[in-house]
Image (tube, grey):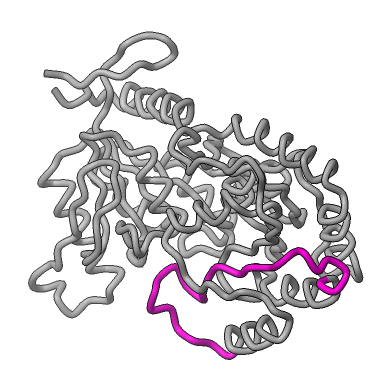
């Protein structure tokens, strides 16, 4: 029986997709990064999610299949080549209606030879990716695959100096109904969540708290994160230095936490700081913080302004005193803090998963119909 889905108010056949994760992206609750979490939210029950073999509990969403190791003559090829060959074997096995590749332009270009419609979902700047660094590469790619970005900022980066083709924008999303309940009164906690790397501004968060903490003795600061999205993340000299300085300033260091635990902490925190130096392709942490009812302080890099709009305080991360002043303005003014929290909650409604799923289904149908490929019965 053909699977049905509601698209633009009508019931239509829903294509079955094979969702290809980046090779290092774990599809398990204790290994998931932003890409895996988004794929989990959007994947339909009949979709096939493929990635490297995992040991932890599989994320919900779709049917997970580990990419097999190819035999001869590919056994001694590079890891990326072996991964691509394994994905191609799964395409032949499951015969999906279309293929969705996340964040790997070269993989999407190679899989387009399968004859199936292929879309490339970009979560990071394509100009730093293999197979999309130059305008010529991006122009050649867009002739073969449908390109989808998670922000308008990424769309602009893809189309820079590209003269043909178009790019769809499908922002990241959250299942707002599945978030932990918020307490009636938020705890006086200032929270940093993210990778403990310079690009994310972890060191600047520590420095700013060190400058303001004596003026707000009833508040405390918490840092959640590690160098990578996993429990066994490597210890780096940067992590060692930041954590040492954080301890000196009385910051609670929680280390890596699974996504559900992060959301539980966000539900309690009154303020969440997103001090990214690098241009954030989207800014999922800021969205999660707003949806959790926290007042948000954000840098203005990359796609972050598209996410927070006017619902967050913006501070230039490395500008003298800006982050400190933003922190104090929220911690010392409960009305201002409540106002930003309320605006953030309203803003987060724009990014609910359920309308995002409908937009994705409409895009899938358009691709399949354009290719003349009937949905799998």
**Residue 191: image location, x then y, percent:** 65, 62
Q: Give the range drawn in magenta.
A: 213-237
Front residue (pair 339, 11): 339
Answer whether residue 188 is magenta in the image.
no
Left or right, 69 with reference to 226: left
Q: Can residue 245 be seen in this view?
A: yes
Say left or right for 232 vs 203. left
Q: Describe residue 231's horizontal placement relative to residue 49 as left or right.
A: right
The image quadrant that residue 25 belongs to is: bottom left
How many numbered callouts? 0
For the N terminus, the quadrant is top left
Residue 160 in view here: no
Q: What's the residue at 50%, 53% (across, down)?
A: 264
Q: Tell me where residue 352 appears, x and y as whole percent.
A: 52, 32
Residue in the picture at 56% in, 36% down: 169
Q: Which residue is drawn at 20% across and 44% down?
A: 63
295 sits to left or right of 165 = right
Residue 305 appears at what percent x and percent y? 73, 45
- The answer to whether 354 is drawn above or below residue 305 in the figure is above
Q: Which secondary structure class fits the magenta region best?
A: loop
Closer to the camera, 215 or 228? 215
Residue 369 image point, x, y percent? 32, 21
């Amino acid at each position: 029986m053909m699977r049905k889905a509601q698209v633009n108010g009508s019931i239509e056949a829903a294509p079955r997709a094979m969702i290809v994760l980046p090779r290092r992206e774990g599809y398990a609750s204790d290994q998931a990064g932003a890409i895996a979490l988004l794929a989990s939210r959007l994947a339909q029950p009949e979709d096939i999610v493929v990635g490297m073999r995992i040991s932890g509990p599989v994320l919900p969403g779709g049917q997970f299949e580990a990419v097999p190791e190819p035999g001869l003559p590919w056994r001694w090829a590079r890891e990326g080549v072996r991964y691509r060959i394994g994905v191609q074997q799964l395409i032949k096995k499951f015969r999906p209606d279309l293929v969705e590749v996340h964040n790997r332009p070269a993989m999407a270009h190679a899989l387009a030879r399968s004859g199936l419609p292929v879309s490339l979902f970009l979560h990071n700047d394509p100009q730093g990716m293999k197979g999309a660094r130059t305008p010529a590469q991006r122009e050649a790619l867009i002739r073969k695959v449908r390109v989808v970005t998670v922000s308008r900022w990424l769309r602009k980066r893809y189309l820079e100096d590209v003269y043909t083709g178009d790019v769809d924008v499908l922002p990241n999303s959250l299942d707002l109904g599945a978030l932990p309940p918020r307490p009636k009164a938020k705890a006086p906690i200032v929270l940093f969540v993210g990778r403990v790397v310079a690009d994310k501004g972890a060191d600047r968060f520590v420095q700013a708290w060190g400058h303001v903490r004596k003026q707000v003795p009833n508040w405390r600061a918490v840092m959640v994160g590690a160098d990578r999205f996993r429990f066994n993340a490597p210890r780096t000299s940067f992590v060692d230095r930041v954590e040492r300085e954080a301890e000196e300033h009385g910051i609670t260091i929680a280390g890596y936490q699974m996504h559900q635990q992060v959301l539980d902490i966000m539900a309690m925190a009154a303020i969440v700081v997103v001090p990214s130096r690098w241009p954030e392709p989207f800014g999922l942490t800021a969205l999660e913080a707003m949806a959790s009812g926290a007042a948000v302080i954000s840098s203005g890099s990359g796609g972050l302004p598209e996410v927070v709009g006017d619902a967050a305080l913006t501070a230039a991360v490395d500008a003298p005193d800006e982050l400190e002043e933003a922190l104090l303005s929220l911690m010392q003014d409960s009305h201002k803090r409540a106002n930003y929290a309320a605006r953030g909650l309203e803003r987060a409604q724009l990014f609910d998963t359920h309308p995002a799923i409908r937009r994705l289904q409409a895009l899938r149908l358009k691709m399949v119909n354009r290719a003349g490929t009937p949905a799998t019965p």
